[in-house]
């Protein structure tokens, strides 16, 4: 990589960084010199390439939140983008299944939220209609979301990258940013292969977004805590048990949706993901461990405050992670016919969850705007569904903050 000068360097070649890059170049500031730097040899190798592949409809999120706004807008924009760029997706629909009276109350709240957020087609259904949609699912009532879909987000991200490059943007892979230095006339982004001079930075580094912000001297009051989500894959003989997407009613105290069944766009059926603390930010295996990164977690006061609040849920998740029997027991609640033999170990993903010093898990997207940088500090699910809406928002913020034209 030769030392070149840019107006904006975007750190992170995941779906958020690439969507921002594409929209900045195509719609906001076509004349700016823009580069994306990605530390891995391939783009979209972390959260974007290790998720459930669900196009969320926007049911779960507080009506005044960015998640609600960006998910609903992002879903429409994503479908249009996929139609225009010949990316396969399927609106297979999803049921959120209540197993008892208490969950019915929470299902009502979800329906109210969904309606307030403008989610189309939501319908509260009884056991008979549920049996028509998902013949093998348990449940005394369910919320049916017919437009929820499935997709391969890696493919989407690569299409964003392609469009960005076609409009003159540059992408550097194998380029981990290790240092950012300020000079009177700008910033220098250092990678092992060389340096890039730039006026501005957009930090979309996912699991390392807090680190990159600190590299720029920002005083960020959150820390990314990595939560691994592990999946099982249903053996082909059991695929018939799941027609679309079967979800539980989520625990409102926790930001994750609970283990569910997902049909993938590639024809598999997955069960998961759980949510266990990872001892390495990109720790996809149980045995993955990094001393410095786990110390970073354990010395953060917010981690212990979070643990004090969620230790019981955390212990249950750990037990379920180490015991297939317990995982299967929980999965059976949604699909009583499922047996341990139906499930083979699947993949995993690691969520970048920002945690405040108070121990609160940041629920909403968090995008911090500075004079010379924009930092995306929290972009968890439904970040992939929302990618075009978040990217459009970041591109607008950046164009405004960085002065419109260079
Ligand atoms: C298990 C799981 C299930 C999920 N399910 C869904 C779902 O069904 N639907 C949905 O909408 N969302 C889902 N999500 C959320 C979604 O995947 C994320 O919101 C989205 O992928 C975030 O994209 P990103 O670009 O911010 O992060 P990433 O995809 O993680 O990209 C960040 C990039 O930055 C790079 N990087 C980091 N540090 C540096 C550095 N120093 N120098 C250069 N590059 C760097 C990384 O290598 C990485 O490629 C799920 C997430 C997980 C983990």
Image (cartoon, grey):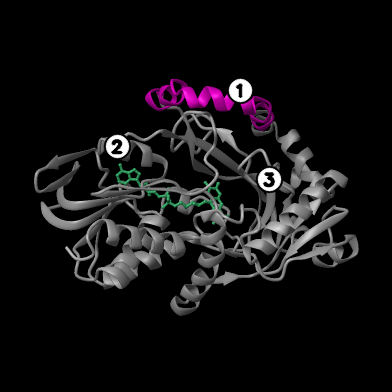
The residue labelled by disc 3 is 259
Main secondary structure type of the part rendered in magenta: helix
Residue 162 located within the stretch drawn in magenta: no
The residue labelled by disc 1 is 308
Q: In the rendering, at what x and y percent does residue 86 appear?
A: 47, 77
**Helix, strand, or loop for circle 2?**
loop
What distance separates the C-alpha of mark 2 from that of mark 3?
A: 36 Å
Q: In the rendering, at what x and y percent does residue 147 appear?
A: 66, 69
**Image side of residue 192 versus residue 149, left or right:** left
Q: Within the image, what quadrant is residue 151 found in?
A: bottom right
The residue labelled by disc 2 is 218
Dot 1 or dot 2: first in sequence order is 2
Q: Is mark 3 within 8 Å of ligand 1?
A: no
Residue 311 located within the stretch drawn in magenta: yes
What distance separates the C-alpha of mark 1 from that of mark 3?
A: 23 Å
- Do callouts 1 and 2 mark residues in contact (Cβ within 8 Å)? no
**Helix, strand, or loop for circle 1?**
helix
Part of the protein shown in magenta: 291-317
Dot 1 or dot 3: first in sequence order is 3
What distance separates the C-alpha of mark 1 from that of mark 2?
A: 28 Å
**Farthest residue in the right direction?**
128
**Image side of residue 269 versus residue 86, left or right:** right
């Amino acid at each position: 990589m030769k030392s070149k000068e840019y107006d904006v360097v975007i750190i992170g070649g995941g779906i958020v960084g690439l969507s921002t890059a594409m929209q900045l170049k195509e719609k906001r500031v076509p004349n700016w010199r823009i580069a994306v730097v990605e530390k891995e040899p391939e783009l979209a190798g972390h959260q974007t390439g290790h998720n459930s592949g669900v196009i969320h409809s926007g049911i779960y999120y507080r009506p005044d939140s960015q998640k609600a706004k960006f998910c609903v807008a992002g879903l429409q924009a994503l479908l249009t983008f996929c139609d225009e760029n010949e990316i396969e997706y399927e609106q297979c629909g999803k049921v959120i299944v209540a197993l008892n009276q208490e969950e019915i109350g929470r299902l009502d709240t979800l329906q109210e939220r969904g309606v307030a957020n403008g989610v189309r087609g939501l319908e509260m259904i009884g056991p008979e209609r549920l049996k028509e949609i998902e013949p093998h699912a348990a449940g005394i009532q369910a919320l049916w979301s017919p437009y929820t879909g499935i997709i391969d987000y890696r493919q989407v991200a690569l299409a964003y990258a392609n469009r960005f490059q076609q409009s003159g943007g540059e992408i550097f892979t194998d380029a981990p940013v290790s240092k950012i230095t300020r000079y009177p006339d700008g910033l220098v982004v250092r990678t092992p292969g060389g340096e890039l001079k730039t006026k501005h930075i957009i930090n979309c580094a996912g699991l390392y977004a807090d680190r990159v912000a600190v590299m720029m001297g920002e005083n960020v009051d959150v820390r990314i805590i990595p939560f691994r989500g592990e999946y099982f894959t249903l053996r082909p003989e059991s695929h018939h048990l799941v027609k679309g997407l079967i979800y539980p009613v989520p625990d409102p105290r926790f930001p994750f949706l609970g283990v569910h069944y997902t049909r993938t766009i590639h024809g598999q059926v997955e069960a998961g993901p759980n949510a266990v603390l990872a001892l390495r930010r990109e720790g996809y295996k149980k045995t993955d461990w990094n001393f410095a990164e786990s110390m970073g977690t354990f010395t953060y006061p917010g981690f212990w405050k979070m643990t004090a609040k969620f230790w019981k849920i955390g212990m249950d998740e750990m037990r379920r992670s180490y015991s297939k029997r317990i995982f299967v027991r929980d999965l059976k609640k949604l699909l009583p016919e499922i047996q341990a033999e139906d499930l083979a170990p699947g993949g995993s993903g690691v969520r970048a969850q920002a945690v405040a010093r108070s121990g609160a898990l940041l629920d909403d997207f968090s995008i911090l705007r500075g004079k010379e940088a924009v930092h995306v500090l929290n972009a968890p699910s439904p970040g992939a569904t929302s990618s075009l809406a978040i990217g459009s928002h970041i591109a607008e913020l950046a164009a405004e903050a960085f002065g419109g034209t260079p």
